[in-house]
Amino acid sequence: MYVPVRATLAGLALAAVAIASQPPVPIPQDPTADPVPAFVGSAAMPRRVHSFRVPRHPFMAPNDRSNVHDDAYQTDTYVGAGPLGRAPEARSTLQNAECGSLTFDSQGRVVTICVGVEGPVLTMIDPETLDTEATFPLPPRSGGGSVFSDFSGGGYFYLDQLDRVVTPTNDRQIWVVGEADGATGPGFELVRMYDLSGVVAVAEGIVSALPDWSGRLWFVTVNGLVGTVEPDSGQIASMRLTGEAIGNSFAVDETGGVFIVSDHALYRFDAGAAGEPTVTWREEYDRGTRLKPGQVNFGSGTTPTLMTSRYVTITDNADPQMHVLVYRRAARVAGARLVCSEPVFAADMSATENSLIATRKSIIVENNYGYTGPTSVMSGATTEPGITRIDLDPTGCHTVWTSMERVPSTVSKVSLANGLMYAYTKNPGPGSTDAWYFTAISFARGATVYQQLVGTGLGYNNNFAPVSVGPDGAAYVGVLGGLTQIRDTP
């Protein structure tokens, strides 16, 4: 059963917000921190990883630039190169907000939403100088979940093929915000708004919105509402997954499949004859017995990730060990849909709240067990270790390697050009020191290649923000204080 509604459309073109370029102020370091190494290891030799070609989505910015997980398949991989650790430099810009999800426009500028206590702000940053070039306030929260663990209303957004930001807001709308030139430089302007208040309940956060391959907008909410919006007419159709919740984004493929995971099951949806969301298949998984420390939602903590043209992968929340699950994603399959289930990490110490990394045959999963918010990794504390690579094989899947690096909460990434996995790690101490490192790990062997200190203290906690690699080869990590950049120097 679906509910058809008509959205309020606005060809609004509200006044562009342009500001005089603001030079960056670095995020403060902890003045009481014990001395820690600025760099550990050695520069990497690039070793290309052979993967599959992720198709370019016609209604999204190019792959590597379009959303928090890099492409419509949510692979968390970059075709381009990231830092090799050649005399790396770590810089930052203080925003007094966490600049988590990053995209890159056609000019290579950082386009991000920085979420602070006063609300989310769409922000444009120059990648060379880290100057703030434009800002655009988005609707603030009106209550509800914690700013540290609720990703609705701007935690997920995407950049479309016209350099426009498409984002859910905290007032039950989806905004389309374009770039514009102002008297003092670049800016933003609101060019369209879809009002979903006819189907989305008061205080029900919209987690994410993405287009399918025909350009139809899909959205999901925290209370299990799945909906579509026809972008021209504004016609809305929706259905609710009764008794289920959704905490993460979703993936879309060129066959029309929309892959959504709730706290009970993995779904494939397709659009029906009237554009309504229709369940094509549903696969329950072991949701476990508890909300583990390291998760913000009961059940799977992953956005579904697509592999080649055949598979979709998530994690479950089983006890005593979490599993990586791989399914056949076609609308119809002969035989079992589940391909394999691989247990990961130590008993009673496994949880993740981040999407899996996927190449042609490999999956990388990280352990976030123990992260319950910023205070859980303060005063020298940290989380349980674990990063594991799993490969598909003719009989299922198997573990290739496990690293003992500790990744409290970041969305890690892989550079296919370099053969490096990039994580944001924190070891215990020393003492009460909280030192945060950009860490490069060999995709082939799982060995740590190098670590670059990014900063010390609370301001450098990434709190679920991803590693992002820009078109200039620099890496970025959003942190509670703002945004950090790690780049090789000549």
Image (spheres, helix red, strand yellow):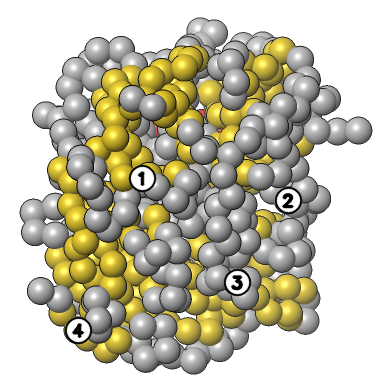
Tag nearer the camera, 1 or 3: 1
Q: What is the count of numbered marks?
A: 4
The residues tagged by marks 1 and 3 sit, at their Cα atoms, a distance apart of 25 Å
Q: Disc 1 vs disc 2: which is toward the camera?
A: 1
Q: Is residue 31 visible?
A: no
Indicate the amino acid at tag 3: Gln
> Considering only order in the chain, which callout, 3 or 1, is on the residue closer to the N terminus?
3
Q: Position of residue 197 (x, y in %)?
A: 25, 78
The residue that appears at 62% across and 44% down in the rendered structure is 78
Pointer 1: what residue?
312
Q: CA distance from mark 4 to mark 2?
A: 41 Å
At label 2, the amino acid type is Pro
Q: Nearer the viewer, residue 120 or 251?
A: 251
Dot 4 alpha-carbon crowd within 10 angstroms: few under 14, some 14 to 19, many 20 or more: some
**Which is more N-terminal, label 4 or label 3?**
4
What residue does disc 3 label?
A: 161
Residue occupied by mark 2? 471
